[in-house]
Amino acid sequence: MSDRFGPQYRGDDEFKTRARLHQSRFRVEELKVLNYNEYGNRLAPEDATAGKNFYPSSGVIEAVRDRYELADTALCRDMLRSEHIPFNLFAPLRGQAWTPKLIAKWLGHEVAEVTEIAVEWAPEPKDAYLDDHTSFDTYITYVAADGTRGALGIEVKYTEREYPWGKTERARMFDEESLYLRAHRASGLYRADVLDSLRTPRFKQLWRNQLLGEAMLQKAEAGIERFTSVLLFPSGNQHFVEVTGEYAEFIVPERRDAFLAVVFEDFVAQCRELAEGREESLRWLDYLGRRYIVRSTPPIA
């Protein structure tokens, strides 16, 4: 393997192998950054703190600084992990005249106004909802054409798959009096025979994210009357292609619109269609396509 793109990791699965090399190439060929930190997809400290992991316009860096410091952390350093991606995908949608049309396309009904786009967000106080660390990578609120107030809770994945239970998490998922199970029962969202499946590592994060939104629906003070849980991931992540299809079948037919799976490729294509030639938006979308959409990877010279 050429040293040009930096070391890769032998333990990666097939898609993660391609994605890691894709990000390593992006560092060298697009960012023109030659230094790396341990692996080719990790920026050196001086480039992490300079914000090189983020799109350099459309309010992205400002959105990061509103929430975190630009520092030598995984958020700013690791080009492969999904932690930074919501900033690059959603901060540029703030204030766009066509953003309501994008949300309407996802939801299948007219949206009059998008009122907030928040990255890394959870309702407070947390003990009024699930009383844990569940949060949305991006939280979008809107007013529908009929005047109802709705929200989308978006989880963004890149190469990640499922992960094991935490000790407290597992205990709550199997405690019939926990806030998880109370929200689950009150929601009426799921088929009666699927609880054991939802508790497994394969589905638990989708379930938790959905439950946070359902817990909000169950409290008037949360201020929403509709909620949709969205998982956004690249089509090459076959794990989530399979999991989202299976998870959707757990939801009762009349509530299937409470969950939506969107792939990166469709997100970029939909935004491009709606941006209608706006130069700044097209520059951003070109960046997203080059940065995150992993096609065939040419051999390393």
Image (spheres, grey):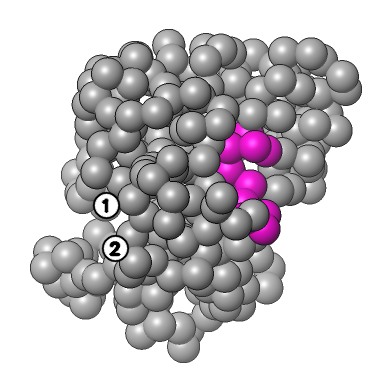
Q: Nearer the viewer, residue 145 or 273?
A: 273
Give, as a single range, the part of the protein colored magenta. Answer: 288-297
Decide if residue 117 is on the left or right side of residue 114: left
Residue underneath mark 2 = 180
Any part of residue 242 in sight? yes
Question: Considering the image in quadrants, where does the N terminus appear?
Answer: bottom left
Residue 293 forms part of the magenta stretch: yes
Local packing at callout 1 (Cα closer than 10 Å; few below 14, some 14-19, many 20+) is many
Residue type at the position of mark 1: Leu
Q: Quadrant of residue 125?
A: top left
Decide if residue 232 is on the left or right side of residue 176: right
Residue underneath mark 1 = 130
Is 100 situated above or below 231?
above
Give coordinates of residue 149: x percent, y percent: 60, 33
- Residues at marks 2 and 1 touching, judged by CB atoms closer than 8 Å: yes
Residue 134 forms part of the magenta stretch: no
Local packing at callout 2 (Cα closer than 10 Å; few below 14, some 14-19, many 20+) is many
Give coordinates of residue 135: x percent, y percent: 34, 43
Compare marks 2 and 1 and give the one earlier in the sequence: 1
Q: Quadrant of residue 148?
A: top right
Give coordinates of residue 240: x percent, y percent: 53, 67
Residue type at the position of mark 2: Tyr
Is 123 situated above or below 175?
above
**Secondary structure at numbered mark 2:** helix
Q: Residue furthest left?
A: 167
Q: Nearer the viewer, residue 56 or 29?
A: 29
Badge number at residue 182: none
